[in-house]
Amino acid sequence: MNGLVLRDIHEPPGPGWWPPAPGWWLLALVLLAAAAILAWWLRRRRLQRRRMERMFDDAVDAAATPAEAVAAISELLRRAARRRDPGADALDGEDWLRFLDRDARQPGFDGEEGRLLLTGGYRREVDARRLETLRAIARARFLEWTTGRR
């Protein structure tokens, strides 16, 4: 017998964790692209909302009198309503107020603010507090219709 000691077959060492397999690189690339697209989309929505907020506020602030402010609010709501339903801007009176409150979480045009919206553009005097309440309700509805978010 020869003095050689025979050893069993050795398995090669397992693959290291770095660099990852090509599939992991591809997955990372897809996730990164999805995150970039989502960030772009969210930023675009945020910028559109700011633009719509500015447009609403500028139009109402440009009014010289409270009655003109009510008229500006009404005009903005009618423009936004056309995006929801092409015939909505032709509604008047109670039908218009019901349309404004349709699908709203909390109806805001069924009370005195709705009456102010209907007749405030023709009044000589408009209560400043009620105008501010109308403005807040109308602004929320306008933004919901133009940006699709509540």
Image (cartoon, grey):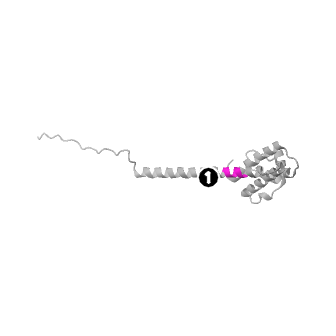
Q: Residue at x 80, y 59 (%)?
A: 90
Q: Residue at x 55, y 52 (%)?
A: 37
Mark 1 neighbour class, 10 Å CA radius: few under 14, some 14 to 19, many 20 or more: few
Q: Amino acid at mark 1?
A: Arg
Question: Residue 102's x, y, as percent?
Answer: 76, 50
Question: Residue 38's x, y, as percent?
Answer: 56, 50
Q: Residue at x 65, y 52 (%)?
A: 48
Q: Nearer the viewer, residue 69 or 27?
A: 69
Q: Residue furthest right?
A: 124
113 left or right of 54? Answer: right
Q: Residue at x 72, y 57 (%)?
A: 83
Classify the position of the N terminus by image quarter: top left
67 left or right of 33? Answer: right
- Is 40 part of what is drawn in magenta? no
Question: Residue 53's x, y, as percent?
Answer: 70, 49
Q: Nearer the viewer, residue 16 or 68?
A: 68
Residue 148 appears anywhere in the view: no
Residue 4 appears anywhere in the view: yes
Q: Main secondary structure of the magenta part?
A: helix
Residue tagged 1 = 44
Q: Nearer the viewer, residue 5 or 145?
A: 145
Q: Residue furthest bottom?
A: 86
Q: Nearer the viewer, residue 42 or 63?
A: 63
Instruction: Identify the magenta region.
Output: 49-55
Question: Residue 80's x, y, as percent?
Answer: 73, 55
